[in-house]
Amino acid sequence: MMSPGKDSTARPYVNPYLGGLLLGLVLFGAYAVTGAGLGASGAITRLQLFFVDLVASHHVDTNAYWAAKAGGDRSPLLNPGVFMLLGVILGGALSGIANRRFKLELRRGPSISVATRVAMALTGGVLMGVGARLARGCTSGQALSGGAVLSIGSFVFMFAIFGAAYALAYFVRKLWN
């Protein structure tokens, strides 16, 4: 993302209230079209399963959990979540290009190296991925979709995310200063 002062040709961001309303409409549409809410971790699991099925299909067929998603002639890619994930990636890229904000960059604080920033990002991503599998959903699946149906577990999950972020902010603040 670019800061507003870097490129005067970049268009302003959408009003957050309008963005929230649009996100709610997208969530409603997802339930109406697919019967499921929003979420990315299930789609990523299906992408991983696709590659496992390519190299060890017998392993997929003998695992009850995996076989239900990709056993036999089933393709793990034929799932609404996979198409949603691809849409998020393409839509985000197209939005960035259309609003003149698309730029590949690595943001970091002035006191850390690029290698440290990449290591911290990968560590955080792995921890969030493991947490998403343990929680049976990522932040979008748990917070947005679960919150929309008033799931107590989703609210506990979000309080835990915010609590952990506040608790760790003191220790990682030097990565940005």
Image (spheres, helix red, strand yellow):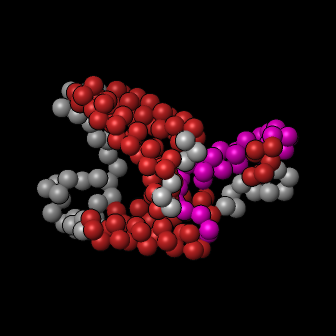
Note whether 91 is above or below 5 in the view shown: below
- Where is residue 114, by image quadrant? top left
Query: Looking at the image, is 162 positioned above or below residue 95?
Result: above
> Going by the image, does 155 lie left or right of 116?
right
Residue 175 visible here? no
Q: Is 68 on the left-hand or right-hand side of 121?
A: right
Position of residue 110 measured from the top left corner of the image (x, y, whole percent):
20, 31
- Region rendered in magenta: 34-63
- What residue is shown at x 31% (from left), y 30% (from top)? 168
In this view, the residue in front, 78 or 19, is 19
Q: Is residue 134 left or right of residue 90?
A: right
Residue at image position (56%, 69%) is 31
Q: Is residue 52 visible?
A: yes
Residue at point 27%, 65% (across, down): 16
Dominant SS of magenta comes to helix
Quadrant where the image shows the C terminus: top left
Q: Position of residue 119 (x, y in %)?
A: 40, 29
Q: Residue at x 35, y 49 (%)?
A: 104
Residue 50 drawn in magenta: yes
Provide residue 118's location: percent of width, then percent of height. Answer: 38, 32
Q: Position of residue 138 (x, y in %)?
A: 51, 47
Quarter of the figure with residue 20: bottom left
| Count of numbered tags | 0
State the image quarter where residue 162 is shown. top left
Near-viewer residue (175 or 137): 137
In magenta stretch: residue 125: no
